[in-house]
Amino acid sequence: MPVIDCDPATARERLEAAGIEVEPGNTDHELWRASHAGATAVAYEGKVVVQGGSPGRLVGVIEGGGGRAHVYFDGGSRGNPGPAAIGWVIVTSDGIAAEGSERIGNATNNQAEYEALLRALEAAADIGFEELLVKGDSELIVKQVRGEWDTNDPTLREKRVRARELLREFDEWSIDHVPREINERADDLVNDALDG
């Protein structure tokens, strides 16, 4: 449960600027609360406490965006198709800005890879980064998003369109294929979600 030492008024402005609804607190001690992406932020005097299963996106928005981030994504299924999970990490020069993982039901490996990319891009857009350097170990996804390879599967085509829409929200972006070792944290998050 992250505790962010900050000015609650500034945190509220950042949340509202990201389109996240802020509601009054439930007690006299709570200044306000906001829920987004599976987590809830509660403001007290001089701090905001974020609770829930996926606090990364809210923490990232509250701490402020801008600048450049490296995004790592991975997805996988056991059975292809089979039980699937995703993992993603957003890293800045200050360290991990946000990360997340979850099971997504039954999917193919490629569907899970795309879903991980979409969740990571949504989180980066929420936080407000201007430049993204996206890295994944799926050559198929990277080349499809770049437009180098066609997407014949209707489900993957729809996800590619959504990825390109999200990428337009950034001033600059690139997406590159990297070896699995470079993508280790995202890969670990996928396996943790599948094993959990």
Image (spheres, rainbow, N blue to C red):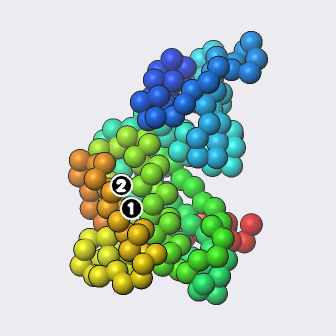
Q: In this view, does 160 lie above or below 7?
A: below
Disc 2 secondary structure class? helix
How packed is label 1: few (under 14 Cα within 10 Å), some, or many (20 or more)?
Answer: some
Q: In which quarter of the image is residue 190?
A: bottom right
Which residue is label 2 attached to? 166
- Residue drawn 57% across and 55% down? 100
Question: Is 124 positioned to the left or the right of 35 in the image?
Answer: left
Near-viewer residue (112 or 191): 112
The N terminus sits in image quarter: top right
Q: Is residue 185 above or below residue 4?
A: below
Q: In which quarter of the image is residue 13?
A: top left
Question: Is 146 positioned to the left or the right of 152 in the image?
Answer: left
- Judged from this view, the residue extending furthest toward the bottom is 79
**Which disc is residue 162 wearing?**
1
Disc 2 marks a residue whose amino acid type is: Leu
Disc 1 secondary structure class? helix
Q: Where is residue 151 in the image (x, y as percent from the top left)?
A: 34, 80
Q: How far apart are marks 1 and 2 (CA)?
A: 6 Å
